[in-house]
Image: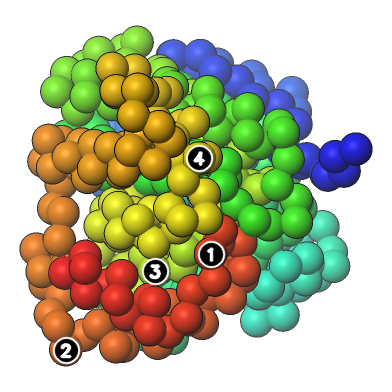
């Protein structure tokens, strides 16, 4: 008998144009004075306008924190929390990419006043409660709207995670209209990020690997594989954007319960040290980590391959299908216009030991990998990805 637990966001609304009804939803379920946590790009490109109009029409008082940066530092979280406390908001909305949603989760926690940020790093360290929380993704990548995880940059380069089901929002809203203007490069990188979530959830050796995550991961890969090229090349294609957003959400549900592993462990230092966006960081190391893992989970990779590439040759046995899958994923990144080597993002040979040192600190992730990763293994993977 398989034993596991599965936690996810209680209410998920998937509806292009859903922002028009945000005000009534918030008024009925969340609060009357909310803080929107977002980034400058969301404001600049007008993605808040429909939400603000709807909230105003529902007589919801709104404050905005728009200073979220990629790979958010502790100072960003504390600054947003300060505003939430000063203005006595009673709920939080996170609207944006993974960074905005991650910040919003922790602001909802810290603004309740029962926790200190330094005390909650790690797994299930949160003791208190949080303010009501709504998360609204504007990229199809992180799946943060359905994950109990917030990633914070601590100090100059180190990434730490806060992991607790208490960070799951009350409501997640998937409005594909918010993603229609995403540039091709961002669409590609975040899409590959979602694929990584699904692949790592399916092959995770975490104790909570479970059939629900496996099923969600496979459906996520089917949706992402079928739509990522169209979403990149035809950014206004509403159907492709909707399918990408749903695929990313399903992948998020999968890895939230069957956690990710070495791809993320090796990607985090690339983002933390060299400020490479998270999705691209994952894409850069994905093929070589999969090649490293293939001796242990090649059959799993072979089972996933036709979901992403329905035309892949399945006549040569699992080992060949696995290798073809890895090669085609590498080709996909290249075809979508992404950088495919570490050198292309400014990383040099002399940087690799530092990257390997930092990767080995990600024990929370490495323990889930299908194959144990030593420092030398990490260094070799980086060398092959250079």
Indicate the quadrant containing the C terminus: top left, top right, bottom left or bottom right.
bottom left
Name the residue that disc number 2 marks.
Answer: 350
Q: Earlier in the sequence, mark 4 or mark 2?
A: 4
Q: In the rendered structure, are the residues bearing label 1 and label 4 in contact, judged by CB atoms less than 8 Å apart?
A: no
Residue corresponding to mark 4: 299
Q: CA distance from mark 4 to mark 3?
A: 23 Å
- The numbered mark, 1 or 3, whose residue comes first in the sequence reads 3
Graded by Cα atoms within 10 Å as few (under 14), some (14 to 19) or many (20 or more), the crowding at tag 3 reads many
Of the numbered discs in the image, which one, if any, rests on residue 328?
none
Badge 2 crowding class, 10 Å Cα cut-off, few under 14, some 14 to 19, many 20 or more, is few
Q: Secondary structure at mark 4?
A: helix
Q: Going by the image, does 306 lie left or right of 7?
A: left
Residue indicated by mark 1 = 371
Can you give x and y, in whole percent of width and height, for residue 97 in the image?
40, 45
Q: Please name the residue that numbered disc 3 is placed on.
A: 266
Mark nearer the viewer, 4 or 3 = 4
Q: Nearer the viewer, mark 1 or mark 2?
A: 1
CA gap, disc 1 and disc 2: 26 Å
In the image as oriented, which residue stretches furthest toward the front?
316
Q: Quadrant of residue 213?
A: top right
Which tag is nearer the camera, tag 1 or tag 3?
A: 1
Which sits in the foreground, 95 or 249?
A: 249
Q: Residue at x 29, y 23 (%)?
A: 312
Q: How far, Cα to Cα, is label 4 from label 2?
A: 35 Å
**Marks 4 and 2 close (CB-CB < 8 Å):** no
Placement of 327 over or under 342, stated as above or below: above
Sequence-wise, the earlier of marks 4 and 3 is: 3
Q: Give the mark nearest the N terminus, 2 or 3.
A: 3
Q: Nearer the viewer, residue 294 or 226?
A: 294
SS assignment at label 3: helix
């Amino acid at each position: 008998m398989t034993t596991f637990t599965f936690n996810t966001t209680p209410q998920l609304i998937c509806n292009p144009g859903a922002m028009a009804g945000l005000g009534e939803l918030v008024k009925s379920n969340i609060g009357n004075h909310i803080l929107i946590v977002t980034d400058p790009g969301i404001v600049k490109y007008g993605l808040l306008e429909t939400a603000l109009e709807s909230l105003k029409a529902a007589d919801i008082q709104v404050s905005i924190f728009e200073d979220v940066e990629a790979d958010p530092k502790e100072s960003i979280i504390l600054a947003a929390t300060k505003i939430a406390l000063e203005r006595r908001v009673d709920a939080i909305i996170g609207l944006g990419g993974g960074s905005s949603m991650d910040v919003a989760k922790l602001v909802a926690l810290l603004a309740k006043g029962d926790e200190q940020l330094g005390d909650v790093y790690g797994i299930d360290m949160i003791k208190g409660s949080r303010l009501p929380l709504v998360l609204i993704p504007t990229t199809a990548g992180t799946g943060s709207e359905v994950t109990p995880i917030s990633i914070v940059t601590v100090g100059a380069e180190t990434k730490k995670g806060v992991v607790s089901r208490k960070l799951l929002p009350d409501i997640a809203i998937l409005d594909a209209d918010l993603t229609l203007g995403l540039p091709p490069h961002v669409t590609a990188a975040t899409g590959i990020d979602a694929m990584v979530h699904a692949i790592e959830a399916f092959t995770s050796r975490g104790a909570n690997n479970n059939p629900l995550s496996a099923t969600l991961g496979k459906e996520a890969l089917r949706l992402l594989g079928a739509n990522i090229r169209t979403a990149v090349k035809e950014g206004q294609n509403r159907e492709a954007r909707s399918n990408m957003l749903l695929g990313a959400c399903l992948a998020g549900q999968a890895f939230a319960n069957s956690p990710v592993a070495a791809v993320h462990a090796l990607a985090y230092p690339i983002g933390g040290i060299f400020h490479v966006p998270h999705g691209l960081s994952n894409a850069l190391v994905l093929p070589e980590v999969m090649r490293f893992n293939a001796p242990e989970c090649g059959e799993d990779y072979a089972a996933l391959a036709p979901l992403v590439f329905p035309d892949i040759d399945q006549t040569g046995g699992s080992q060949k299908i696995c290798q073809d899958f890895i090669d085609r994923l590498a080709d996909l990144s290249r075809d979508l216009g992404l950088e495919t080597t570490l050198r292309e993002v400014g990383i040099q040979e002399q940087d690799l030991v530092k990257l390997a040192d930092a990767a080995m600190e990600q024990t929370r992730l490495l323990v889930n990998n299908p194959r144990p990763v030593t420092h030398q293994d990490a260094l070799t993977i980086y060398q092959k990805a250079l």
